[in-house]
Amino acid sequence: MSTAVLKTEVRLFRREPGAIFWILLFPTLLLVILGSIPSFRDHQADLGGLRTIDVYVPVAVLLGMIVGGLQAMPQTLTGYRERGILRRMATTPVRPSALLSAQMAVYGGAALVSALLALAVGRLGFGVRLPQQPLGYVLALLLAVLAALALGSVVAALSRTTKIAGAIGSAVFFPSMFCAGVWAPVQSMPHLLARIVGCTPFGAAAQALNQAAAGHWPGWSHLGVLVVWILLLTGAASRWFRWE
Amino acid sequence: MWRQGASREPDAMPVIEVTELRKSYGGRTVVDGVSFAVEEGEIFGILGPNGAGKTTTVECVEGLRVPDAGRVRVTGLDPVADHARVARVLGAQLQQSELQPKLTVREALELYASFYPSPLDWAPLAERLGLTAKLTTRFGKLSGGQKQRLFIALALIGNPRVVVLDELTTGLDPRARRDTWALIEDVRASGVTVLLVTHFMEEAQRLCDRIAVIDKGRVAALDTPAGLIRRSAGATVISFTPSAPLDDRDLAVLPALASVEHKDGRITLSGTDETVNAVITLLARHRITAHQLRVVDATLDDAFLDLTKADTKEEAA
Ligand SMILES: Nc1ncnc2c1ncn2[C@@H]1O[C@H](COP(=O)(O)OP(=O)(O)OP(=O)(O)O)[C@@H](O)[C@H]1O
Ligand SMILES: [Mg+2]
């Protein structure tokens, strides 16, 4: 990891208004829109007495990392490879892997900022309680970010062009959003579906975050699913990634 | 502006050594036994037709490609196995590459300077390459020639011992081209070794101490620019309009003659200095006056075309 490369990539990220909007602001904006619907602020028996807005905070938390990790990062990395930016870097004492790790740090950091923003706005705007099991929440959050970055790296490894990266990214993006609970939070999914979704990285992450939010230590099965995905995806990415 | 490296021991070892280098892509051999050695402080040129294997060769020197066979050494080190150490002393300008589109010129210079142990000051370097007015411009908004200048700056920013320049002045306007040549001459004067791929004969003739002509993956000739010209058949061209017709048989027996051409009563011969003397004697003997007599030395251009001739013929066939 080169700090100069990281600083540069952070600076370049700040010059991408599209990425800033979709990763940092959009998840919270969605939360605000949902929170302004009066019925979403009513306690629901089928959500275990929680309000819809309460269960959407973890969804918003996951959304930023899904957009950043699966859509933005693979396209940037594939573009760097396609344009020979990685090759140019390969002739310097700093290896092109410095760019890869800087990209991960940028999108990982952005996902965490986005998550904090969603938690803060949920708390301040709609009285959503902060996670009751903070340590478990942070652990689940970090594992989810790693899984998103690993999945994004696999997309970048499999895509020869930015166009393909966009296509594969979208193909993984919508199922991931579904698993995270954007259309229907995991709590309201039928039991079997919730079980299946729980085997996917973002389904497992959503359930772990929900548990920690409610004050329980996140289930080891959910954390375990995340760890297995991270290991598998990282292995696949490092095996298939091409620098040129 | 060029700082000498702290300890540049004078040693006899060539700075770049390429021995029997071979590289193929999908079974097609594109570099087929290339050997050359570049001495410290030398500007070594590589000429050759498109697709001859020039870029492949120099990218093996830069450690970007792994040779299939043969040996490459830069300051005695293997550019692939010892990449980190080679990269610290080697500056490269690639034939094709880009930077992040939203990175400004100044940021690029600062970033790349930060990669090296004792980089140059980027401001005077930018000044010499005419980039000062463009420092806050983003890479994506630069013109082709400005991008090229930036890449030349990035090749030099690390204060390298060796620079590899692949098509140094392609895309530069005539003034920028001349300024760049002067810059490279200054760089060399400070002891830097330069490996230069070019398609411009004027550039090769002005800058290079020695030139390797690569054709179809092999070294077709390796000599000084003057040596290459001398070696090529038809190094001297004699043309004149004779006052009376000359017998073709008399011309055909001229020593060292490479070609004869008749056009609109004008005769053009190519050969060597020996041919020139013989023609003059021949004309005197027949009391023929040579109107508009011109004797022109062949250029590197002619030598290049001559050395890579077989190629074009084969392709045409
Ligand atoms: N990555 C690659 N994969 C397959 N073939 C390649 C690759 N790179 C180069 N080649 C082939 O190798 C041959 C030599 O290419 P190279 O780029 O070394 O030529 P060059 O002498 O630099 O030509 P030019 O003057 O056009 O730059 C070409 O026929 C090219 O098609
Ligand atoms: Mg080339």
Image (tube, coloured by chain):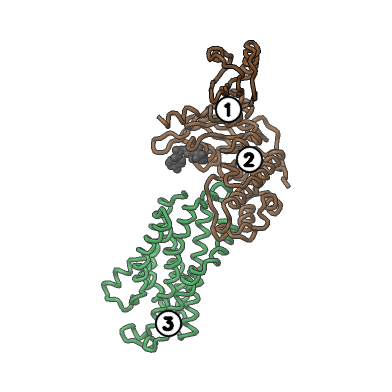
Chain colours: A green, B brown
- Marks 2/3 same chain: no
Query: What is the C-alpha distance between the residues marked 1 and 2?
Result: 20 Å
Q: Is residue B17 above or below residue B96?
A: above
**Of the residues tagged 1 and 3, which is closer to the observer?**
1
Q: Circles 1 and 3: CB distance less than 8 Å?
A: no
Q: Secondary structure at mark 1?
A: strand
In the shown orientation, is residue B247 left or right of residue A54?
right
Q: Position of residue A33 (x, y in %)?
A: 42, 82
Three-letter amino acid code at the position of disc 1: Leu
Q: Which residue is mark 1?
A: B222
In the shown orientation, is residue B45 left or right of residue A43?
right
Q: Which residue is mark 3?
A: A33
Three-letter amino acid code at the position of disc 2: Val
Label 1 crowd bin: few (<14), some (14–19), many (20+), radius 10 Å: some
- Marks 1/3 same chain: no
Q: Is residue B84 above or below residue B276?
A: below
* Quarter placement of the N terminus of chain A: bottom right
Q: Which mark is residue B304?
A: none
Q: Chain of mark 1?
A: B
Query: What is the C-alpha distance between the residues marked 1 and 3?
Result: 73 Å
Q: Position of residue B206 (x, y in %)?
A: 66, 35
The picture quadrant where one finds residue A69 is bottom left
Q: Circles 1 and 2: CB distance less than 8 Å?
A: no
Q: Which residue is mark 2?
A: B162
Viewer can see residue B101: yes
Viewer can see residue A231: no
Three-letter amino acid code at the position of disc 3: Ile
The picture quadrant where one finds residue A170 is bottom left
